[in-house]
Amino acid sequence: MANHMTPDEFRRHGYQVVDWIADYWSTLDQRPVTSADPPGTVAARLPPGPPERGEPFDRLLADLDTVITPGLTHWQHPRFFGYFPANTSGPSVLGDLVCAGLGVQGMLWSTSPACTEVETVVLDWLAELLDLPARFRSSGSGGGVIQDSASSAILIAVLAALHRAGAGRWRGHGVERAYRVYASSQGHSAIEKAVRIAGLGDAGLRTVGVDPETLAMDPAALRTAIEADLAAGLVPAAVVATIGTTSTNAVDPIPAIGELCREYGLWLHVDAAYAGAAAVCPELRHTHAGLEYADSYCFDPHKWLLTGFDCDAFWVADRAELVEALTVLPEYLRNAATESGEVLDYRDWQVPLGRRFRALKLWFVLRWYGAEGLRAHIRDSIALAERFADRVRADQRFELVAPSPFALVCFRLRSTSDGAADDGANAELLARVNATGRAYLTHTRVDGRYTLRLVPGSPYTREEHVAQTWRLIGEIAAALPDRRG
């Protein structure tokens, strides 16, 4: 007979898990940010096969300390400054716990009405917080839905664009013509992957040049690419523009791009995966200018809005167009509510059929923090980044590499001779900083030059953590060969 955990056992062990997580969060500052163990270390701590008999819960909990946490990169650490934030929060974790406990499958409205309706309302709330165009609200022709990531949102947008570009034939006949999707050279790699998955191949993606100063898409170059493809008998289908590129947070000129999309009949998807959260602050909404042209838009609350992964907020201006492209309705899913046309079935808005109740964690976060709390978090992160950038400017050994409109700082050691880019020194600096376990940064290349990136975003990060990291960077820079003194 299966040894199911009883409600009383769940209550007792659940308290233990919550205590463990709280202790983990409260001791993050004392831990190294990354693991120094070589590959295979964690696997070697695990037995070669599954247990024949169930084990006491205390042993599971103990192994979190001995097996799991020593092999982690601690993304919630106050001195984790790499990639983009992927931060969670107490209300998000508790919302996820409720989601897991309920265990509902929200593929259809009828399979759990609350799962669908809370998501619809919460995405409308979020659209209001960001002041998105009215066409994205569920009260009109559009609406929002939670995807797992911005990568999935881009794929969905590309598929809908192909359906439109093919005048509805894409569903039945597939990719019949040589369609093209356009993005800047700074666009995320997810665009390339989406174009491949959609069946267009690498040739289906047109990389558009950028302004050399801002690194944002050049609308003139976009027009040239579209015209060239039309002349060659190809079919322009979509543009993926970015608000806050991964390397430098560049903001593509959405108004000019939108005008071109309208002129040529292209689908415009705007990817604001990281930077979209900034629009909860009225003073930062100027970065969203031109969204009235967009057919779809997304950002990740799981990056900078204190909601645990996975939670991408994706909106479309015309939900009927999206559903027409993606819907499949086998007999076993038919039901009266769907056939009435009065409900949303989110299975038609995504690639998978199944859906978790992901809106719960977002609902918890929005209600716990409120608009004021979320704005304070964004502003705190930006202030920390600005103070770090000030330190870079004041140190003649370093230079800022790109503007920082949000909370990303791109910087590097200056070249030491002949103006040559000293990539080796910057790579060595990053490697040595990260090897200490006292901070974690990542890198990119800007104009071909190796560049360090620092992005605060953890709710645990304070001014002292940024100051400690700057001191560490300076100490290690001084110890590099040919940089002493």
Image: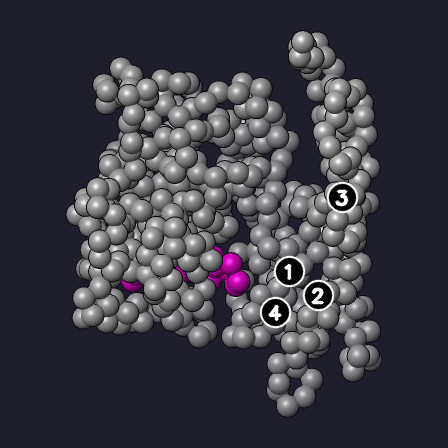
Residue shown at 67% from the left, 88% from the top: 417
Q: Is residue 315 above or below residue 484?
A: above
Can you tell which quarter of the image residue 228 is in? bottom left
Residue 281: give x, y in percent of width and height: 48, 46
* Residue carrying label 1: 442
Q: How far apart are the two marked residues, 3 and 1, measured between alpha carbons?
A: 23 Å
Question: Could you say whether the residue bearing mark 1 is in a helix, strand or loop?
Answer: strand
Q: Is residue 80 above or below residue 249?
A: above
- Type of amino acid under label 2: Leu
Residue shown at 72% from the left, 29% from the top: 50
Residue 212: give x, y in percent of width and height: 44, 75
Looking at this view, is 328 or 285 the one in front? 328
Q: How far apart are the two marked residues, 4 and 3, measured between alpha carbons?
A: 31 Å
Looking at this view, is 354 or 310 the one in front? 354
Question: Which circle marks residue 451 in the picture?
Answer: 4
Residue shown at 58% from the left, 31% from the top: 92
- Type of amino acid under label 1: Thr
* Residue carrying label 2: 430
Question: Which circle marks residue 42 in the picture?
Answer: 3
Nearer to us: label 3 or label 2: 3
- Type of amino acid under label 3: Val
Assess whether mark 2 and mark 1 are in contact (beta carbons under 8 angstroms): yes
Nearer to us: label 3 or label 1: 3
Residues drawn in magenta: 244-257
Q: Residue 253 lies in magenta, yes or no?
A: yes
Can you tell which quarter of the image residue 361 is in? top right
Crowding near pointer 3: few (<14 within 10 Å), some, many (20+)? Answer: some
Question: Could you say whether the residue bearing mark 2 is in a helix, strand or loop?
Answer: helix
Q: Earlier in the sequence, mark 4 or mark 3?
A: 3
